[in-house]
Amino acid sequence: MTDILDDLAWRGLIAQSTDLDALRASMAKGPITVYSGFDPTAPSLHVGHFVPLLTLRRFQLAGHRPIGLVGGATGLIGDPSGRNTERALNSSDVVAEWVDRLRGQVGRFLDFDAQQNAALMVSNLDWTGELTAIDFLRDIGKHFPVNRMLAREAVSARLSGEGLSYTEFSYQILQSYDYLELYRRYGCTLQIGGSDQWGNITAGADLVRRIEGAHVHALTLPLITKADGTKFGKTAGGALWLDPEMTSPYAFYQYFLNSDDRDVIHYLKVFTFKSREEIEELEKAVAERPFAREAQRALAEDLTELLHGRRELDAVVAASKALFGQGALEELPATTLGAALAEVPKAKVDSLGASFVDLLSDSGLVESKSAARRAVKEGGAYLNNLKITDESYVPTSDDLLAGRYMVLRRGKKSIGGVEVG
């Protein structure tokens, strides 16, 4: 039962802990209950939430009981952590809708039917919604020294800038109350979360100690960064979402397939369930055969299958190969093809009639019409993987894939597209 901590340490997944030795001793006595919370601040979780989600799953696989908490109450308030300005408050109807969506996403990674340690799913509105203002202030608020709350980094930073409302100031108390309720209801003795949540999580552990006299634990996970200095999980189109309607499985797959060699082994440790031996073999492949990108493919395939299932993985792999002439474009589903072309330079036209050279130029795949003509003349221009040698060629309806798309390629690696209609 204690091997999980050694595994987390090897994977670089322990940022801070109240007392690792005490936690290890507690786990040596038998399974514990652990929780992590997810606030509905958007209609979907993003890839950064993968870290606590998959860590909950690791705890369950190690024999412990996980609780996924969705913030039906705290989502109405908003956490000031990491923000320079006051968060815009969403209506209760919007938050309730987002809670339902997040429940489905969190639940996808946990086993609710396990015989010994079945996962639980809760919303903190279940207990916070019953509190009166007087009960909240009298029974809970009295245990929070204001001087300690003011010293918290997220609070002090805001107070020295644009200020902080009492609404957001009270967030720490609400999250702490979650820990107390989960301890009372389910015997939960460990909360995990991102390292930016350290103040909130330790405040909850302290509240349990003050009211119940129990020693519970806090463990935070590092925030993932990229070696090139850009923000992890951000794309040209915004955040990398777990909802396939907001980030397509193809875009999700390509994001991890394009991981930097400097990042990929770390990502394999953090985001996959591959063994140490498997990851060390992939690390060797990165050093000896970086051009093969074996580690990147393993990462992208594991994560896409985990999130979207085997069928979607097969579809995006087929699309990736077909775009580069290694498969039949005609066999790709329209949704997968459309998602793939959304990630490359693309021209949108109302109807057919433009020449292939014009489309090459308009898509942005080449910098000018003269460059497009040169690509055709040199034999390096393709339409749906067929080489075009006639500079005057005008695509027809027979060239449309799924009735609306065409795939353009220059050379072996530069892909573009056309969408008609």
Image (cartoon, helix red, strand yellow):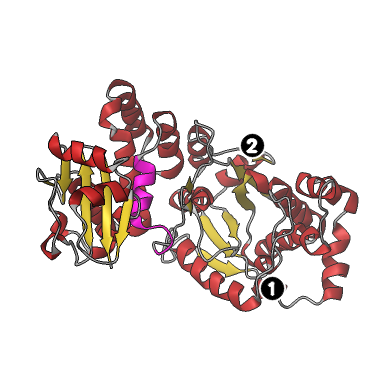
Residue 342 lies, with reference to residue 225, above or below; the image says below
Residue 263: image x %, image y %?
44, 33
The verdict on residue 346 being magenta is no
Question: Which secondary structure lies at badge 1?
Answer: helix
> Which residue position holds label 1?
127
Q: Specify the quadrant of the image occupied by residue 381.
A: top left
Q: Residue at x 46, y 40 (%)?
A: 270
The secondary structure that dominates the magenta segment is helix
* Disc 2 packing (10 Å; few <14; some 14–19; many ≥20): few
Question: Which secondary structure lies at badge 2?
Answer: helix
Residue type at tag 1 = Trp
Q: Residue at x 27, y 52 (%)?
A: 417
Residue 166: image x %, image y %?
83, 62
Residue 206 lies, with reference to residue 264, above or below; the image says below
Q: Which is more foreground, mark 2 or mark 1?
A: 1
In the picture, the disc for residue 141 is: none
In the shown orientation, is residue 31 left or right of residue 331?
right
In the shown orientation, is residue 280 left or right of residue 46?
left
Residue type at tag 2 = Asp
In the picture, the disc for residue 21 is: 2
Would residue 305 be seen by someone viewing this image from the given angle? no
Label whose residue precedes the other's in the sequence (2 or 1) = 2
Instruction: Give the spatial CA distance, label 2 vs label 1.
Output: 32 Å
Magenta-colored span: 245-257
Q: Depth check: give the residue in front, 64 or 71.
A: 71
Residue 164 lies, with reference to residue 325, above or below; the image says below
Residue 397: image x %, image y %?
14, 65
